[in-house]
Amino acid sequence: MANLMDQYESHQYRGSGRTQRQSKDSIPEPISTGFISARLEDEVPIFNKQKIQFKPRDPITHLKVSNNMLVLAMSSNLLLRIDLENKENTDEVEISHSLDNRPTRLHLDPLGRHLLISMSNQETLYLSRNSKKPKPLVKLKGYVIESVGWNNYNTSDMSTGPILFGTSRGLIFEGEIVSEDESKFFAGAADKYFKQVFSLGKENPSPVNSLHFDRMPHNSQSEQKYFIMATTPGRLYQFIGTIPVTSDPPIFQPIFANYEDSPARFLELPGNFGYSNLQYYHPKGIKSAPEQFAWMTGPGVYFGNFDLSPQQNQDVTSESKLIAYPSDNNTSQNPLSIVLTEFHILLVFPDCVKAICHLNEQLIFEDFHRTGTFGKLLGMSKDPIKGSIWSFSDQAVFKYKVVRESRDVWQMYLDRGEYDLALAYCKDNPANRDKVLTKHAEHFFQEKQYDKSAMLYAQTQNSFEEVALKFIQMDQQKALQTFLWKKLNGLKPVDKTQTTMLVTWLIELYLNRLGALKEQGLQNDGKYYTLRDEFRKFLAHQRVKDCLSFNKNTAYDLIASHGNIEDLVFFAMLMHDYERVISHHIQHDDYRAALDVLTNKQGDTELYYKFSPVLMQYIPKQTVDSWIAKGRKLDPQRLIPALVNYDHSHDSKASSEAIRYLEFCVHDLSVQDTAIHNYLLSLYAKLQPEQLIKYLRIQGQNPDSVPYDLKYALRLCAEHSHKEACVHIYRTMGLFEEAVELALQVDVNLAKVNADLPEDDEELRKKLWLRIARHVVEEEKDIKKAMEFLHECDLLKIEDVLPFFPDFVTIDHFKDAICMSLQEYNQHIEALKEEMQDATESAKSIRSDIQEMRNKYSVVKAQGKCSSCRYPLLTRGFYLFPCQHVFHSDCLVTEVTPNMTSARRNKVDNLLRDINSAPATPQASAATDASAATTAMSKGEQQKSELDDMIASECPYCGEMMIMSIDKPFIEPKEFDEVVQSWQ
């Protein structure tokens, strides 16, 4: 049973009584020339039934499907859940141990995650998708839940969100169900809250058969507007109201509170059969606003559309009508349930399924059920998310596939005169589309709306000559023009002859109309300009341009014959003859028009290089703006002639524009071309010296990365006496001596900055600082300032500066510096003495410690025990540490080796093996007795000494080894299971 959905029948199941009904309007009619009506295959029914290869273990009583989750309830109180996307994910759930307590209804949410089961003992069970056991809802006990208004906007698998419950006594409750973790021993109640919000029948209670709520558009940001629809067997109720965005449950109480004092709005239809069913159609998914509704009730199906406009506060239904049930002799039973699709209403009877088109209220489909084989039909369910339709009997499950539901809708809309809708539903059938367009065109022609008629006639397969003649006879030149233009758009690229004919005809019509307006003196009238713009748009159309590109001379001759020079220029631009157009504007001194064509009408950059020198002479700012707008599409180096060609000394405005463009290239485009930077640098040096040093600083001081020529820049700045710039360039070239020498002519502080630059060459730094000091002493005669250099440069000493002072200078000028220097030397000598004293004391202390260690000993008592194994110590060789911990030799090895590296551990093993294999010799009583060692040790003694160094260098309990092993677990991972087992 786990794979019951894995197989479908290889052929579609078709009952002997199933028929596809068509109205007489759907029979193919003769169509216009160009189409052939033919049936290439049997007409497939709109609703094509497929039987699922599944025989239930017990009779089926209920079926629900949502979000590809199929739920079946059987008479044995077993619930079968099947994930249609993963058919292996199928499980059985026992509803109740008692067969006397059976499910009466299943309520499955749109997500397919939350299931409510109404039981015959007036109990409601809740089953989440991840649960294997239904959970009773204590707060709902005693109420028979007939319907549930699910929250279509809920996305949680753990909670239903606020939902509405309708009971058999006409009560409406609001509640929320939460799926608790079953692993928790003290799990809370699933029904989070449950409160009555309204009663539909206080005097004469009726069951609430259907409940739905949805949002409506609302202008407020703090409130949401909802409408709620509820049905009883004979009434359809509407509730409309707003609730705050953030409100405490029950959130729908404010809506129902509006109807406590005044009666709720309802529609009552006479006669009922004890139950009803309300279905919505959501065109764009369950979370979108519903578009249509269908209410199955006694006299028929009440169908209509929704009007959810924000101002709607009374009735959300519109264009409603009552569709009677099919009246025939095949069945006299009441329908069990309905399903609403885009154009049809499916009615389920015990022995058949019928479909009614709600556009014309005609029965278009009947599927008679073989009750003797599969039992009577019990119901039908539509997946609100996936749209699949399922029906079932107690012995079988069927799936209906909707095949081209809108196939005959176009004819119905056409007969009703709704041409746009008819056209929308026949777009896949050229013959039907031609019928609709022809009939629509004839309608407009009779109404004397010739332009609209021409647009539609051009899309049909009617004779071109006949249609054109109709408009010529009515003297409708504009309509004829519209018809020709639309026909032109419908031609294929290979129809070059027809295209040329239509384009030429249209040009002639336009020129004739423009000429007629000129003859009437209306060339300055708005009507003339409108027609001229329309003509130019026609010429600019890509299809027309492609055609005229092979017939330029014809078009030139035709336009010139009417003396229309402006349109000739316009046509030349369309043909991309921009060079001729620009030359025309320049010859007429219309430089702005020439620049407009150059900038906005064409994309050939070569024309920029050709015409920029002329444009730069007359409109430099606009020309530079166009260059900047082009950005990287232009090569700045090729524009240099346009900049150099103009004498900047005569026009400072033009020169500033040249600098503006070069700055754009350097700063915005990051151009690294040397010619651009050299030219900008030359303009700065000549015209804007205040920007020169700023530019040089921005470019940096790396000689390998600066974009300008250093030698050219140095020569240029020297010619214009820009000394600070020369200092910067010297510094960039690494000529620090020249930089400092020139900086001293500008500012001593600038020289100081340059003197500190060679950080890796202390000798050169010292030399540069001495040059500055000499300058200050000899040139500025400022001895005090020179002495301050001793504090600014740590490389200079008083003895370095003294030679620069003149002979007549008294010692008073640098007495402080000499004293400070001597004091520093004295402090340095004292520091060295203190270090020597500390070293002497340390050596004495070390010698004392060594002497004490030589004379140190410890006493081991006869009853002493090993710190590791706790056995008597004197039974075998041992090690004694200053901390009084004592270990047998082998115990010490056992304690130490786990904390060693693998290499040291192997070394210890090898030493032990060599020592044990050597001839036995008397062992010392203590490992620390170093006096027993001799100058020339034997090989065995060397090995023992090496072993001692490795294992007895420190106490394993008190030394660094114990600190390093602080994060080691008390029980080794490989021994953990064995230790745990020993504790049990």
Image (cartoon, rainbow, N blue to C red):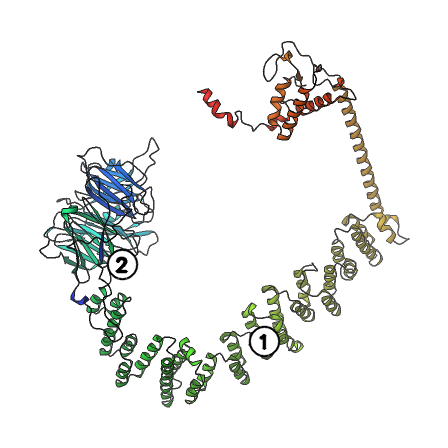
Is residue 854 shown above or below 459?
above
Q: Picture quarter containing residue 42?
A: bottom left
Give the total number of marks visible in the rendering.
2
Quickly name the residue at label 1.
609
Q: Which mark is residue 311?
A: 2
Q: How far across and how far down the image is residue 107, in percent? A: 24, 44
Amino acid type at image mark 1: Tyr
Given residues 622 and 241, the one toward you in this image is 622
119 relative to 843 in the view: left or right: left
The answer, for residue 166, to whether it is visible in the render is no
6 or 698: nearer the viewer: 6
Secondary element under disc 2, as helix, strand or loop, is loop
For the point 46% across and 20% down, which residue is it?
983
Q: Residue at x 76, y 62 (%)?
A: 746
What kind of residue is marked 2? Gln
Q: Position of residue 597 (x, y in %)?
A: 51, 77
Q: Is residue 676 above or below residue 4?
A: below
The C terminus sits in image quarter: top left
